[in-house]
Image (spheres, rainbow, N blue to C red):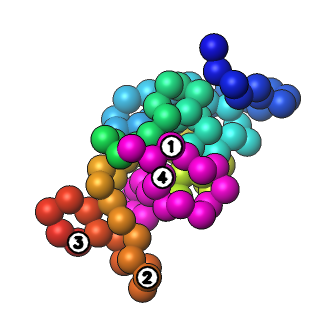
Amino acid sequence: MSGFRRIGEGRAVTITVDGAPLAAREGDSVALALLAAGRPTIGDGPTPYCLMGVCFGCLVTIDGRRGEQACMVPVREGLAVLTERGAVLTEDGAVLTEGGA
């Protein structure tokens, strides 16, 4: 049983994560949708989501935009998410992924 409890219920929507459909609730962040689906981290990273935009452990590609923080983007119907395994955001805002930039 999770220690998280949803406050209110947004409209049910479907997003895709790495090409697979995922049920989510409108108004939740992408990170929260992943957490609710049993994915406490992205890729093989050891870091759980901070859910407040400070750790950069939740970088994903959202609708083609690389380096988005999953905890800062609300879900909406049809949103397409690609996880960025091993991604790191540098001081100058560049996103480095496994095997280079």
Expressed as whole percent of the image width and height from the top left, the position of residue 30 reads 57, 44
Which residue corresponds to mark 3? 101
Q: Is residue 48 left or right of residue 18?
A: right
Residue drawn at 34 percent across, 35 percent down: 19
Quadrant where the N terminus sits is top right
What amino acid does circle 4 point to? Cys
C-alpha distance separating marks 3 and 4: 17 Å
| Label 4 vs 1, first from the N-terminus | 1
Task: Please state the extent of the stretch shown in magenta in the rendering.
Answer: 46-67
Is residue 52 covered in magenta?
yes
What amino acid does circle 1 point to? Pro
The one of 48 and 25 positioned closer to us in this rendering: 48
Which residue is the extreme one toward the right?
A: 8
| Label 3 vs 1, first from the N-terminus | 1
Q: Is residue 27 left or right of residue 34?
A: right
Q: Classify mark 1: residues with Cα within 10 Å, few (<14), some (14-19) or many (20+).
A: some
| Label 1 vs 2, first from the N-terminus | 1
Looking at the image, do the residues carrying marks 4 and 1 touch, with CB atoms under 8 Å apart?
Answer: no
SS at mark 2?
Answer: loop
Which residue corresponds to mark 2? 91
